[in-house]
Amino acid sequence: MVDRMERISAYLDGEMSAEDAARLEAEAAADPELAAEIEAAGALDDEIGLAFDALLDAPLPPALAATVSATTTPGTRVEPATPTVPAATPMGEDPAPAPDVARAEPGVPGQAAVQGQGDALPETPAMGAIPPGGAAPREELPPPVFTPANLDRRPIFSASIAAVLALLMVGAGAGALLTRVFAPGTELADGHATRGWMDEIADYHRVYARQVRHLAEVPASEQDHIEAWLGKETGVPFSVPDLTASGFTFQGARLLVAGGKPVAQLLYTDAGGQVMALCVLAREGEATPEFTPRSFDGVEMVRWLAPGAAWVAVGEPGMDLDAVARAAAQEV
Amino acid sequence: MQPDATDFQAELLASLPRLRRFALSLTRHPSEADDLVQMTCERAITNAPKWNPEQPLLPWLYTMGRNLWTSEMRKRQVRTGEGTVPAEEAAELVSHAGGEENTRAGQVMAQIMALPEGLSSVLLLVSVEGHSYAEAAAILDIPAGTVMSRMSAARARLRAALAGEAA
């Protein structure tokens, strides 16, 4: 049986000799079942091709570009105000692509990385090629830890990658069929219009709360950087609340996208290692005094509205999120 | 500078959607795929002077990404005794990320993501991108015979899974 499928596969993949292919075709001519199997396998390949090709239309998430530009080590950080970004116009793009990248959303991550076009590409791309803690004699050797935040960053190259990625977003069409496979929380296809940004944050929480080793993109030790970076990206200036009195330890932060907007996610853990997150995104409007609880299929949230910002505390059932939210609201 | 940096960046830029797709076929996990793409880009830019512009960039990037991913898997096995995401969980993550898979392409992709480790990437390289078994074997650092058996297994499993879904 497997042998039969191997032959069909080799035939479809052009890996058969002419004689073997002719033999299979002759067999299929006399065996309608085999002929049907070959045809079905070919049709399946067409479907596989369509499914994979749909992935190519998915716009790169802004977070990917932002991650690259934002996780430089302290002291070598890229400062978006005085960028060292090279002229990232390799596809004949307009040399000032920022308005397109921004897509009418002020503060979209990645935008900063493509400002200040026109600098030359660095001439010494090999500098800093060896990761710390392990002289790498072979190029296959990985950096010490996979987590981007833990890597030794070469800011110039990081910035240039960010520019490349940000530019790519310009070319990538919106409304891609499988956007959501790659980027939960970006624009969703038909039938998902009712899903709001809080649903998307709940999705993120389900995924990230299990990423114990990869919990944060930027660790808590870089709190100043987190406040500057995420304050700028989201357009919501804030201070990272100290929630130790409520039993939560700050672990670090990520940049997410929900409702089409950049979202700062501040990650905390309790004594038992359970993850709680504070998320914030910009919004129009004034503060309201309510702290509103909501449940999302196993993810609990308490939302409050500050001037120009919406905050949520996100956690597990059983956490006193109302108290956490009230404490955090005093500090942010 | 050799090769020309602007050329290299243009090529890298043009390669990103496919590199990302390949990374997803390796990791079967959207956020890990993006981490891997990022790492691969950094590695590629660092190693840009070693790239021969006569050679197509994509297989070079693929090999680099696969190397990084293999190393990562090896480290995880050492640390935790575990390998990659189990197929069921990968499928669950995709459906979490996607909500309802209400399109045919979405259904097919969910099943591809749920294939056992090593099958999705072979399927992508050979069936979709038209690489020969030998080329796919070189990129993935596996024997050509393994490419053949994985192609056959991937097709058989997908056929069964999609037939089950339609029923």
Image (cartoon, coloured by chain):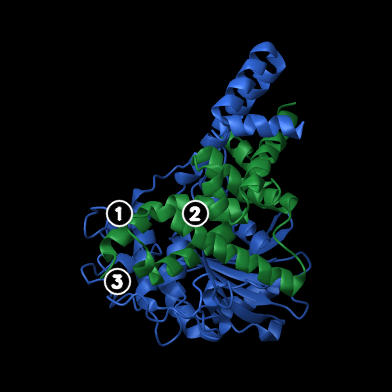
Q: Residue at image x 34%, y 64%?
A: A163
The disc labelled 1 sits on which kind of residue? Asp
Give how far apart the Cα atoms at labels 1 and 3 are.
Answer: 17 Å
Output the chain of dot 2: B
Q: Secondary structure at mark 3?
A: loop
Output the chain of dot 3: A
Residue A232, image quadrant: bottom left
Give how far apart the Cα atoms at labels 1 and 2 are.
Answer: 22 Å
Q: What is chain A's hue in the picture?
A: blue
Question: B111 or A185, which is in the foreground?
Answer: B111
Quickly name the residue at label 2. Answer: B20
Output the chain of dot 1: A
Which quadrant holds the N terminus of chain B? bottom left
Which label lies toward us, 1 or 2? 2
Q: Are marks 1 and 2 in contact (CB under 8 Å)?
A: no
Tell me the crowding category of disc 1: few under 14, some 14 to 19, or many 20 or more residues within 10 angstroms, Cα based: some
Quickly name the residue at label 3. Answer: A85
Q: Are marks 1 and 2 on the same chain?
A: no
